[in-house]
């Protein structure tokens, strides 16, 4: 089920909302949100609900163990066992096919008679997100950053909360713990107002900007071999805005929905295209993931401590793993590696880079990010090479169909993402004129949804 | 209440949502004809198979082909009048035919047999009825399994008659029934089906739930800009534009040029019809299979840039026809008749299929009726002694 679907807007959301506020006790509300989370998830494939339930149970039990035992050995056993199980599930469902394919390709290129085959493994939607929820919970409990909950329903509600279940943001337990504890005292009116503001803005970002841009660039990129240089640049600039408005739109909707249920989901995007350097970009893009990678990978690896080369190694490793997290494809690994190299290069040339004018740094950073999106968007490295060739070697030809719509969309998207404040910088208290304008945008988004323009969110695939 | 208190996003946005829902609900009480561009949309109940809405008459003078609609090609639309009547069972027949006791032939098959885009008097059933002087019941788009066909024959009082089964080239023969009885639905689903079949309110509600007028209107508005000029048409690849020898454009289904017959599907068709012929014979009903080519198979040889292998579909139908004939299953392969008629018509600047649709037109149906009627008459003569 998508947030931008009629079944969600007309059935799931009203029922979930009305029943939630009819219930009074904490446990009832935890139970209801857990149940609705599983219903929401089962719209993709009910079979994988068991997987989520298993992952939830394992991490909950590990949390209880960490609560009970103080001795180091047992605590380590709890964390290692639970994280291993979580990573094994993620590895099997997300990376087994990729690993087998890689081994087979390697064997073929070396002339070995080896062919690994296994069952056709379906990637459960959102596994990367809820696995990170459970892992961060266990590790935080181990580090004593949080006190694990004894209430199973509170925990299962945290893992299966529908608003952040399948595409994040990756909410850490400590970020939402207080709201979960006070779920029976949530302020319905305040949450309703701010929730709708976030939700309507997110929906407009997704449906009006991201999907309209996608409607033009997707057919053009499907025939990427025929792209001219101008066409390739337009497509990739378009993709940069598409992925930003798609994912940040989804995150805004998730935040809005969270508010409607008294839960404050943290910020996931902070105007990333206003970043002036690679470090700044990763402080602004997919914040919930980048902070997870920082806190659970980069810093344990040593962070910036130790020598310069160790620091660079840690950056590269973190970004390569971050790239692989996005999907089982070499393009994502290379994309992660590319961003790792950008970070290393930035740290090597920091003084001279920071001395450049701010506008120039912003523009350069945006172009560097677009180059990364070529890798991210490509189905394989061959496609990425062809797209780079079309972008950087003059290729005459026509522009994509729908360029008359694309150009104004890019201008609006550019103005919103480069100049205007983001949704978290707004006060969400609208003057009547602006409220009517935003309601009109919401109505237009709704009309497009009724008209059948329903594109899945890009980050669902991860 | 002050206006300013109402002009708040948290009130306006949910209000928009509710109003849109109410508008859709309200529009469902209007006749569906307002939202349809041809009978198919107005009369279909939903799903791929099954009869139309019963006891309905739909008429328009501005119908056009689905390929022009799918390809969003207003310039290639060929507007034509259309009048469609359904009987009490939802099939496309004169209302009194089912009760007349005159029915000797039941005709079932795809939308070609149903008579998409043509008038009631021009359907294949009507043409055959004129030629044979007997009642031919158009049961096209029935679930073509044995129990449905048997039930139809019983209700129509066809004790000794003919069932004509039209199989379209790229359709699979209905399964499974390869040598045994068809699996029966479970007791519970059957009981539910029996209960719901008689509940008019339930059927009305289900029918209404299946079609959303607001969705149709929104989609139509969106299609206006998805015209490959403002925005790419997402269904563009579903339509193939090709030029005929006379220089005029004709539309085909997008997958037509690449479509390849499957030997397994041919095998299934032969086995199914052989089995069906034996089962129907036990009830005193003869089976006549008619093999209908795709429009692309008929017009492939007449395209200005003819495809490399224009006969791939024709050969497949020929193989099925030969194998059925070997098993003494009566069969008519319509490909040769339609191909030669298409060539002759093209020479006069006429067509036997709608240029903007996948279906044959009234002239094409005359060709089909001319090819089928003699075989039907033969079956009648064989039966008489």
Image (cartoon, rainbow, N blue to C red):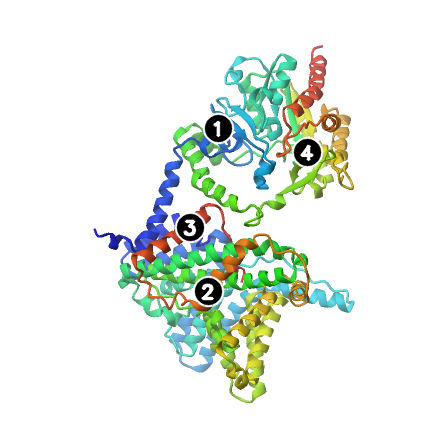
Residue count near mark 1 (Cα–Cα under 10 Å), binned few <14, some 14–19, many ≥20: many
Camera-nearest label, 3 or 1: 3
Q: Which residue is mark 4?
A: B295
- Residue A425 placement: quadrant: bottom left
Residues marked 2 and 1 touching at CB (< 8 Å): no
Ranked by sequence position, the earlier of labels 4 and 1 is 1
Cα separation between marks 3 and 1:
33 Å
Visible in this render: residue A376?
A: yes
Mark nearest the camera among 3 and 4 is 3
Label 2 in the same subunit as label 3: yes
In the figure, is residue B338 to the left or right of A143? right
Which numbered tag is attached to residue A403? none
Look at the numbered disc 1 and give the secondary structure of its residue: loop
- Label 4 secondary element: helix
What is the distance, in whole Å, between disc 4 and disc 1 at their CAs?
27 Å
Q: Please name the residue shown 38% across and 71% down the image.
A: A175
Mark yes or no: residue B51 visible.
no
Q: Is residue A97 above or below residue B80?
A: below
Labelled pair 3, 4 in contact (Cβ < 8 Å): no
User: What separation in Å lies between label 3 and label 4 (alpha carbons)?
Assistant: 40 Å
Tag 4: Cα neighbours inside 10 Å, few (<14), some, or many (≥20)? many
What's the chain of the residue with tag 2?
A: A
- Label 4 near label 2: C-beta < 8 Å? no
Residue B53 - label? 1
Q: CA distance from mark 2 to mark 4?
A: 51 Å
Closer to us: B94 or A173 = B94
In front of the other: B144 or A175: A175
How far across and down, in percent of the image, does residue B357 sit? 62, 34
Disc 3 designates what residue?
A: A444
Question: Are discs 2 and 1 located on one and the same chain?
Answer: no
Q: Are marks 4 and 1 on the same chain?
A: yes
Residue at the extreme bottom: A307
């Amino acid at each position: 089920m998508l947030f931008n679907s009629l079944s969600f807007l007309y059935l799931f959301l009203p029922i979930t909302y009305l029943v939630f506020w009819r219930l009074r006790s904490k446990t009832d509300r935890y139970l209801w949100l857990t149940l609705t989370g599983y219903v929401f998830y089962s719209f993709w494939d009910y079979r994988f609900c068991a997987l989520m339930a298993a992952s939830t149970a394992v991490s909950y039990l590990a949390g209880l163990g960490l609560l009970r035992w103080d001795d180091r050995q047992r605590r380590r056993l709890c964390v290692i066992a639970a994280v291993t199980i979580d990573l094994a599930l993620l590895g099997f469902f997300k990376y087994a096919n990729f690993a087998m394919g890689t081994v087979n390709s390697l064997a073929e290129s070396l002339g070995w008679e080896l062919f690994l085959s296994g069952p056709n493994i379906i990637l459960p939607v959102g596994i990367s997100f809820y696995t990170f929820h459970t892992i961060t919970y266990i590790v935080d409990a181990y580090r004593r950053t949080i006190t694990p909950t004894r209430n199973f329903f509170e925990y299962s509600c945290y893992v299966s909360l529908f608003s952040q279940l399948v595409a994040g943001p990756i909410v850490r337990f400590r970020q939402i713990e207080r709201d979960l504890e006070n779920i029976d005292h949530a302020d319905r009116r305040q949450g309703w107002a701010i929730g709708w503001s976030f939700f309507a803005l997110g929906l407009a970002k997704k449906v009006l900007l991201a999907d309209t841009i996608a409607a033009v660039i997707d057919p053009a990129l499907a025939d990427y071999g025929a792209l001219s240089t101008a066409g390739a640049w337009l497509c990739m600039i378009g993709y940069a805005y598409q992925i930003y408005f798609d994912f940040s739109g989804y995150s805004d909707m998730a935040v809005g929905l969270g508010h409607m249920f008294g839960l404050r989901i943290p910020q996931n995007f902070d105007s990333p295209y206003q970043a002036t350097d690679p470090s700044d970009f990763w402080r602004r893009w997919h914040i919930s993931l980048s902070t997870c990678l920082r806190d659970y990978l980069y810093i344990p690896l040593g962070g910036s401590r130790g020598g310069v080369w160790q620091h660079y190694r840690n950056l590269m490793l973190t970004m390569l793993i971050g790239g692989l997290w996005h999907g089982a494809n070499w393009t994502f690994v290379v994309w992660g590696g590319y961003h790792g190299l950008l970070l290393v290069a930035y740290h090597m040339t920091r003084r001279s880079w920071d001395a450049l004018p701010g506008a120039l740094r912003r523009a350069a950073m945006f172009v560097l990010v677009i180059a990364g999106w070529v890798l991210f968007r490509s189905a394989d490295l061959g496609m990425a090479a062809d797209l780079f060739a079309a972008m950087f070697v003059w290729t005459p030809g026509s522009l994509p169909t729908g360029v008359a719509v694309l150009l104004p969309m890019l201008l609006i998207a550019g103005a919103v993402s480069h100049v205007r404040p983001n949704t978290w910088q707004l006060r969400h208290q609208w003057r009547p004129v602006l409220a009517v304008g935003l309601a009109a945008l919401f109505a237009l988004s709704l009309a497009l949804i009724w008209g059948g323009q329903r594109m899945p969110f890009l980050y669902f695939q991860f | 209440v002050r206006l300013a208190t109402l002009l708040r996003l948290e009130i306006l946005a949910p209000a928009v949502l509710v109003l849109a829902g109410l508008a859709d609900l309200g529009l469902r009480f209007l006749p569906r004809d307002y939202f349809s561009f041809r009978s198919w949309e107005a009369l279909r109940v939903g799903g791929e198979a099954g009869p139309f809405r019963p006891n309905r008459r739909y008429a328009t003078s501005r119908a056009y082909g689905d390929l022009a609609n799918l390809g969003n090609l207003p310039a290639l639309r060929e507007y034509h009048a259309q009048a469609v009547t359904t009987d009490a069972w939802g099939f496309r027949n004169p209302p009194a035919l089912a009760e007349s006791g005159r029915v000797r032939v039941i005709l079932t098959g795809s939308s070609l047999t149903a008579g998409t885009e043509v008038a009631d008097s021009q359907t294949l059933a009507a043409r055959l009825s004129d030629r044979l002087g007997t009642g031919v019941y158009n049961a096209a788009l029935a679930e073509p399994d044995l129990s449905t066909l048997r039930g139809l024959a019983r209700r129509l009082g066809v004790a000794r008659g003919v069932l004509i089964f039209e199989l379209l080239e790229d359709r699979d023969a209905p399964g499974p029934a390869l040598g045994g009885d068809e699996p029966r639905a479970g007791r519970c689903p059957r009981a539910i089906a029996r209960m719901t079949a008689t509940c008019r309110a339930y059927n009305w509600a289900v029918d209404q739930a299946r079609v959303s007028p607001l969705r149709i209107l929104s989609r139509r508005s969106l299609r206006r800009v998805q015209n490959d000029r403002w925005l790419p048409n997402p269904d563009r690849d579903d339509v193939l534009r090709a030029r005929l020898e006379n220089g005029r454009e004709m539309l085909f289904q997008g997958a037509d040029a690449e479509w390849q017959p499957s030997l397994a599907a041919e095998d299934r068709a032969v086995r199914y019809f052989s089995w069906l012929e034996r089962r129907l014979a036990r009830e005193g009903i003869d089976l006549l299979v008619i093999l209908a080519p795709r429009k692309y198979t008929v017009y492939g040889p007449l395209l200005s840039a003819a495809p490399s292998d224009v006969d791939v579909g024709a050969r497949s139908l020929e193989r099925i026809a030969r194998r059925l004939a070997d098993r003494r299953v009566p069969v008519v392969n319509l490909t040769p008749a339609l191909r030669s008629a298409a060539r002759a018509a093209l020479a006069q600047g006429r067509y036997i299929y709608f240029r903007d649709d996948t279906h044959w037109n009234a002239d094409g149906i005359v060709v089909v009726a001319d090819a089928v009627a003699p075989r039907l008459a033969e079956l009648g003569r064989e039966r008489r002694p």
